[in-house]
Image (tube, helix red, strand yellow):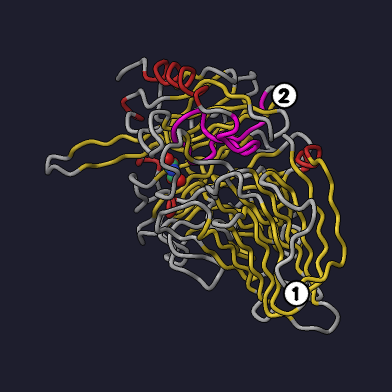
C-alpha cells in the first residue's frame, strides 16, 4: 500500500482548501477543508481543546475512499483546521477508514478507534467486504496505526454476527478504568444490533455481549452507535438504515434513533423505556457525543442524510456540514437538545417584539438575515381560532423556506422545496409537536446554508440544509386566522 496517501491528501488540502473563501461556507457550522464530509468521528476533549474528526474524501464532493479529516476548537463554534489524520493506506483499511471515535490514554496519547474496510474479489468474481476494528495513537495532530491491527475481527463476533456489517466503534474509558466500546453489527435475523466490547489497555479487546438489537423492528443495519448515561438514564443512539416508516416518528430510509432506558453494567442489561427520533428534520445522521470537562453531554451530527446527498450545488468545492453542537438532557423521559450555550456570546443586535397580531403576511422591521438566532412564540389571539401559522425565511421573490404549524393536528412541517435545490429528493418533513397551553415556541438558527429548528425549548429538533442564494434573507410571518406572536431575534457574528 502507498505510504504517501496521507501526505498527498495533506498536501492537496493545504494547497486547494484556501481556494474556498469563508463566505462560501457556513460561518460556524463545520464543513470539510475541501471535498466531501460525512459522519463526525472522534469527537473528544484532548489537551485542553475539543477535537473533531470526520469522514472525508478531499478529492471530490462525492463519497469515496474514506480518510479522516480533523479540526479542533476551543468553543465548539470556531474550528481550526488540522491536517488530515488518517488515510486508507494499510492492507486492512485499504478501502476506507470508516467511522470511529477517540479517547485519551493514561500516558497522554490520544487513541483513535475506527473501522478498517477491505474489499477483495472472491473466486466466483464477487466483491466481498470485511470490516474490522482498528486503532491508532497520536498527539492531537499525527497518528500512527497500531502494528497489530485489526484489534477486532469476525472471530470476535457472537455467533451469526456479520463480518461485513461490523462498524463504527464508539469508545470511552469508564468510571472503573476499563475501556469499553459499542459497535454496530448485523445479527442472524439480518437486522441491526449494538455489541459491547471491553479492554484493560485499549489494545486487547473481548466481547461482553449485545446491548440491544432491532429485531427487524427499527431498520436493518444499526450504524454509528453511542452509549452514555444522562440525567439518571442510559441513552443508546443508533442510526438505522432501511427503516420502514413509523407514523411521523421515523421516516423511511436512514434515520436517527434515541433509546432511553436503564443499564446494569454488571449484567450488561439495557432495559428500554422509550424510543424516539433524535432529529425530525430532513438532514441529520450519525450523531456522536462527548462528555465535556464541565459535565455537559454534547452531541454533533452530520447535517445531511444519505437519502438527500444528490441535492448539492453544482460548482461548490465542499459538500457536507456538521450540525451545531447541541447540549443534551432528559426532561419528562424525552431527549432535550439545545444549541451549545457558547452561541449566546455570538448574538448581536437584539430585536424584540411582543404580542404582535398576525392575520396576514407580516414583515417586522429588523427581522431578516441568514445568520440568525431567533425565537418565535405563537399562540391563538384571544378566543379566535387559527388553522395555520407560517414562518417564512431565506426569502426573496423566488425562494422561500417555510415552517408551517397547524394547531388542529399539532403538525409542524419544514418545507425547503424552494430553497435552491433542483434535485428530486425529499424537501419536506412533518413532525408531531406538543403545544403547551396552546402555545408553541420555535427557536430557529440559520447559518447561510442551513436551518435548525428547536421546538418547545429543545423538545424536538429539525435540521435541513438549504442552498438558497444569500441575498434571499427576508423573513415574514403569516396566519390563516389570527395569532399573537412574540419574536426575539439576534444576528450571529461568529
Ligand atoms: N458512514 C461511514 C460508516 C458508517 C456510515 C462510512 C454512516 O462507517 O456506517 O463513510 O454514515
Of 27 and 103, nearer the camera is: 27
Query: Residue 263, can we see it?
Result: no
Is residue 371 found left or right of 281 in the rendered image?
right
Q: Dot 2: what SS?
A: loop
Question: What residue sits 48% from the left and 59% below the top?
Answer: 213
Of 477 and 208, nearer the camera is: 477
Provide the residue designation for mark 2: 48
Question: What residue sits 49% from the left and 18% below the top?
Answer: 14
Is residue 127 found left or right of 332 in the rendered image?
left
Whether 5 is drawn above or below 366: the answer is above
Category of crowding for the residue at label 2, using alpha-carbon neighbours closer than 10 angstroms: few (below 14), some (14–19), many (at least 20):
few
Label annotation for residue 410: none
Question: What residue sits 50% from the left and 37% below the top?
Answer: 100
Category of crowding for the residue at label 1, using alpha-carbon neighbours closer than 10 angstroms: few (below 14), some (14–19), many (at least 20):
some
Magenta extent: 22-46
What percent of the width, then of the height, locates residue 231? 75, 53
Provide the residue designation for mark 1: 359
Label 2 with label 1: CB-CB less than 8 Å: no
Of 439 and 421, nearer the camera is: 421
Question: Ligand 1 appears in which quadrant?
Answer: top left
Q: Is mark 2 within 8 Å of ligand 1?
A: no
What percent of the width, then of the height, locates residue 118? 31, 34
Amino acid at each position: 500500500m502507498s505510504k504517501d496517501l496521507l501526505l498527498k491528501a495533506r498536501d492537496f488540502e493545504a494547497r486547494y482548501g484556501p481556494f474556498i473563501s469563508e463566505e462560501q461556507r457556513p460561518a460556524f457550522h463545520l464543513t470539510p477543508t475541501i471535498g466531501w464530509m460525512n459522519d463526525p468521528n472522534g469527537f473528544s476533549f484532548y489537551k485542553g481543546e475539543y477535537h473533531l474528526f470526520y469522514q472525508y474524501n478531499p478529492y471530490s464532493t462525492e463519497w469515496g475512499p474514506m480518510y479522516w479529516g480533523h479540526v479542533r476548537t476551543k468553543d465548539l463554534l470556531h474550528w481550526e483546521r488540522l491536517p488530515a489524520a488518517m488515510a486508507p493506506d494499510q492492507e486492512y483499511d485499504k478501502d476506507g477508514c470508516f467511522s470511529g471515535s477517540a479517547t485519551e490514554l493514561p500516558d497522554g496519547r490520544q487513541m483513535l478507534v475506527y473501522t478498517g474496510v477491505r474489499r477483495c474479489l472472491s473466486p466466483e468474481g464477487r466483491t466481498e467486504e470485511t470490516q474490522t476494528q482498528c486503532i491508532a495513537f497520536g498527539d492531537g495532530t499525527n497518528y500512527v496505526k497500531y502494528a497489530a491491527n485489526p484489534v477486532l475481527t469476525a472471530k470476535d463476533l457472537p455467533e451469526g454476527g456479520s463480518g461485513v456489517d461490523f462498524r463504527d466503534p464508539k469508545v470511552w474509558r469508564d468510571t472503573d478504568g476499563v475501556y469499553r466500546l459499542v459497535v454496530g453489527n448485523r445479527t442472524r435475523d439480518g437486522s441491526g444490533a449494538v455489541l459491547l466490547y471491553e479492554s484493560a489497555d485499549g489494545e486487547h479487546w473481548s466481547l461482553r455481549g449485545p446491548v440491544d438489537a432491532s429485531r427487524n423492528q427499527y431498520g436493518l443495519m444499526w450504524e454509528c452507535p453511542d452509549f452514555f448515561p444522562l440525567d439518571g438514564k442510559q441513552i443508546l443512539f443508533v442510526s438505522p438504515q432501511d427503516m420502514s416508516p413509523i407514523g411521523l416518528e421515523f421516516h423511511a430510509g436512514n434515520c436517527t434513533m434515541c433509546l432511553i432506558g436503564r443499564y446494569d453494567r454488571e449484567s450488561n442489561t439495557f432495559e428500554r423505556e422509550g424510543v424516539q427520533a433524535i432529529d425530525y428534520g430532513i438532514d441529520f445522521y450519525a450523531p456522536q457525543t462527548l462528555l465535556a470537562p464541565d459535565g455537559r453531554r454534547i452531541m454533533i451530527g452530520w447535517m445531511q442524510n444519505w437519502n438527500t446527498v444528490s441535492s448539492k450545488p453544482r460548482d461548490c468545492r465542499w459538500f457536507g456540514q456538521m450540525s451545531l453542537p447541541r447540549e443534551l438532557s432528559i426532561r419528562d423521559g424525552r431527549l432535550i437538545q439545545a444549541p451549545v450555550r457558547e452561541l449566546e456570546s455570538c448574538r448581536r443586535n437584539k430585536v424584540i417584539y411582543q404580542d404582535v397580531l398576525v392575520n396576514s403576511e407580516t414583515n417586522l422591521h429588523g427581522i431578516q438575515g441568514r445568520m440568525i438566532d431567533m425565537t418565535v412564540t405563537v399562540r391563538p389571539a384571544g378566543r379566535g381560532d387559527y388553522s395555520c401559522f407560517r414562518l417564512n425565511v431565506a426569502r426573496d421573490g423566488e425562494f422561500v423556506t417555510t415552517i408551517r404549524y397547524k394547531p388542529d393536528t399539532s403538525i409542524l412541517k419544514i418545507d425547503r422545496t424552494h430553497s435552491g435545490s433542483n434535485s428530486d429528493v425529499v424537501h419536506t418533513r412533518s413532525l408531531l409537536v406538543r403545544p403547551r397551553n396552546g402555545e408553541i415556541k420555535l427557536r430557529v438558527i440559520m447559518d447561510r446554508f442551513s436551518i435548525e429548528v428547536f421546538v418547545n425549548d429543545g423538545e424536538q429538533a429539525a435540521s435541513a440544509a438549504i442552498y438558497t442564494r444569500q441575498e434571499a434573507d427576508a423573513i415574514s410571518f403569516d396566519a390563516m386566522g389570527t395569532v399573537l406572536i412574540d419574536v426575539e431575534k439576534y444576528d450571529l457574528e461568529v
